[in-house]
Image (spheres, helix red, strand yellow):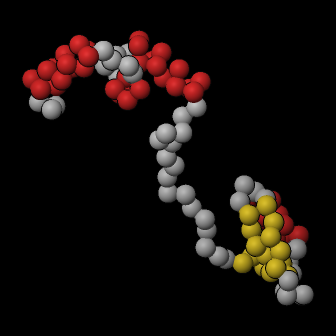
Amino acid sequence: MPTYDFLNTETGEVEERFMSLSQREQFLKDNPHMQQMIGATATVSGVSIVGKVPDGFKEVLAKVSENHKQSSVANRHGKKSIKESQTQRIVDKHLGKF
């Protein structure tokens, strides 16, 4: 739920309220002396979890990579032997991925 700023036109005070869109509409109907103030919204462009994966979830990712060796999860989180790494490098080279 977003936070809205309202200007009380009778007192000139600004109030900040945390409510849903439907609650905001009802609030404005019930309080005609309150006027919503339009301001810049806070947006999040993206979230990165690189290096922030909990240990328990790392175990889950490792188990997934064991059962799905060709998946992108296995490429990022799986443990491969030297032989498996060299074999994958040769396959990628011949498929034109390298």
Horizontal placement of 43 versus 35: left or right? left
Q: Is residue 40 at least partly visible in the picture?
A: yes
Q: In which quarter of the image is residue 39?
A: bottom right
- Numbered marks: total: 0
Residue 18 spot, x, y in % from top left = 79, 61
Left or right, 77 with respect to 70, comes to right
Q: Is residue 95 left or right of residue 6?
A: left
| Percent position of residue 47, x then y | 51, 49
Residue at position x 61%, y 73% from top? 40
* 79 and 97: which is toward the camera: 79
Corner quadrant of residue 35: bottom right
Provide residue 92's location: percent of width, then percent of height: 16, 25
Q: Is residue 71 left or right of residue 8?
A: left
- Residue shown at 15%/32% (left/top)? 98
Whether residue 31 is situated above or below residue 25 in the rendered picture: below
The quadrant of the picture occupied by the N terminus is bottom right
- Residue furthest to the front in view is 82
Which residue corresponds to the image point at 49% horizontal and 52% vertical from the top-left?
A: 46
Q: In this view, does 53 lie above or below 67?
A: below
Reply above or below: 52 against 96: below
Looking at the image, can residue 95 be seen? no
Q: Using the image as rendered, state which of residue 17 and residue 10 is in the foreground.
A: 17
Q: Where is residue 53 in the image (x, y as percent from the top left)?
A: 54, 34
Q: In which image quadrant can residue 91 be found?
A: top left
Question: Residue at coordinates 59% horizontally, 24% vertically from top-left?
Answer: 56
